[in-house]
């Protein structure tokens, strides 16, 4: 059967026309991948700014291998993405399953058991398990990525070492480095919400929930806040796939009274072409730069 994904185009993009492919060896390539999304951005060290952004939807309902098939199509057609001489490459993975374990209890040879327990089932043998240490607050994030997908990225960039990091890790590190580590933080995907809570600069809660409707999503948020004893005026920051006119936003504003949309990571500079970017939307992708 022919690959149904042909001539795929980004759903959103920003391109600074000053970017020159001859400068790739002086650029960091930041990639974020999930079952339903592929996005990347280019940080040019010569200009010291983010200069390029592309965001693609992956129609994963077509078949279970659609992510890898779509990635191959994008790379075959792209003018510079497959270049193998980037300064560095950061691969962020929005894993279906992850868990955080305190440093003092973590044993590397038990990583699969921790993840299986968090998922409530045995993680697929198709997944390769990794860990990422949050040295700032003494925790280890355990997560998985499809073996075939990770192997393909390594084959695409044989001249560069690729150590995958979890998207939730980028989010947490960004919050900490931007000194926003207090209050509630909500990261929205199409059908998932990650809820993070900091108190007095310490991480107290982090979990990801699946939802089908905005009402389901609000229930998860209010349930967690009730369990944590948080009032409705708790400072709450929004990230990811949410807008001020979306139903999920309207539903949340009926319960929460102190909402803000996140701004771009404070330690990163952007080309003037990014002035109209909804800053909260790509926070995790940009903040993965903090992990260098």
Image (cartoon, rainbow, N blue to C red):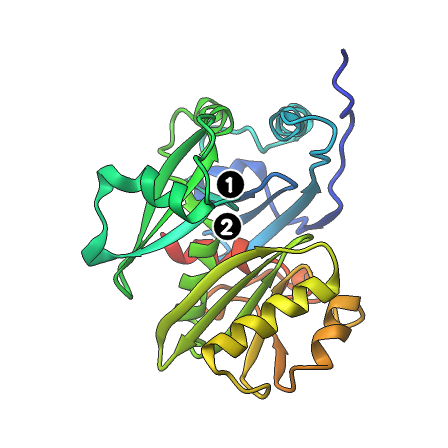
Residue in the foreground of this view, choosing between 198 and 231:
231
The residue pinned by badge 2 equals 44
Q: Nearer the viewer, residue 73 or 1?
A: 1
Query: Do the residues under discs 2 and 1 have CB atoms within 8 angstroms?
Result: yes
- Going 36% across and 55% down the picture, which residue do you hit? 100
> What residue sits 66% from the left and 61% below the top?
274
Distance Cα–Cα, label 2 vs label 1: 8 Å
Q: Secondary structure at mark 1?
A: helix
In the picture of the structure, the residue carrying the numbered disc 1 is: 23
Residue at image location 49% in from the left, 51% down from the top: 167
Residue 276 percent across, percent down from the top left? 72, 66
The answer, for residue 68, to whether it is visible in the render is yes
Of badges 2 and 1, nearer the viewer stands: 2
Q: Residues within 10 Å of mark 2 (few under 14, many from 20)?
A: many
Q: Vertically, is 254 above or below 246?
A: below
Q: Residue at x 47, y 55 (%)?
A: 168
Q: Is residue 152 above or below residue 161?
A: above
Residue 272 in picture, x, y percent from top left: 65, 63
Mark identifier at residue 196: none
125 sits left or right of 131 in the view: right
Nearer-the-camera pick, 233 or 265 = 233
Q: Upstream in the sequence, badge 2 or badge 1? A: 1
List x then y, in percent, for residue 268: 48, 64
On the question of residue 242 being in view, the answer is: no
Quadrant the N terminus occupies: top right
Name the image quarter holding residue 139. Answer: bottom left
């Amino acid at each position: 059967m022919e690959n149904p994904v042909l001539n795929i185009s980004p759903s959103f993009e920003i391109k600074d026309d000053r970017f020159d492919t001859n400068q790739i060896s002086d650029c960091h390539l930041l990639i974020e991948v999930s079952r339903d999304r592929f996005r990347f951005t280019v940080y040019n060290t010569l200009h010291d700014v983010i200069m390029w952004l592309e965001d693609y939807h992956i129609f994963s309902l077509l078949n279970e291998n659609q992510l890898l098939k779509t990635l191959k199509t994008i790379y075959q057609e792209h003018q510079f993405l497959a270049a193998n001489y980037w300064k560095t490459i950061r691969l962020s993975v929005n894993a279906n399953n992850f868990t955080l374990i305190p440093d003092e209890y973590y044993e590397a040879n038990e990583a699969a058991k921790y993840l299986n327990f968090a998922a409530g089932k045995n993680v697929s043998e198709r997944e390769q398990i990794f860990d990422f240490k949050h040295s700032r607050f003494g925790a280890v994030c355990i997560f998985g990525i499809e073996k075939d997908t990770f192997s393909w990225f390594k084959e695409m960039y044989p001249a560069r070492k690729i150590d995958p990091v979890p998207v939730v890790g980028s989010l947490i590190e960004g919050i900490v480095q931007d000194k926003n580590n207090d209050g509630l933080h909500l990261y929205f995907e199409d059908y998932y919400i990650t809820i993070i809570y900091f108190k007095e600069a310490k991480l107290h809660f982090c979990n990801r929930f699946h939802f089908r409707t905005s009402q389901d999503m609000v229930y998860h948020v209010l349930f967690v806040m009730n369990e944590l004893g948080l009032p409705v005026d708790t400072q709450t920051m929004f990230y990811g796939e949410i807008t001020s006119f979306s139903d999920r936003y309207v539903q949340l504003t009926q319960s929460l009274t102190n909402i803000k949309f996140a701004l771009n990571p404070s330690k990163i500079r952007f080309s003037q072409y990014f002035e109209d970017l909804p800053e909260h939307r790509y926070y995790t992708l940009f903040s993965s730069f903090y992990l260098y």
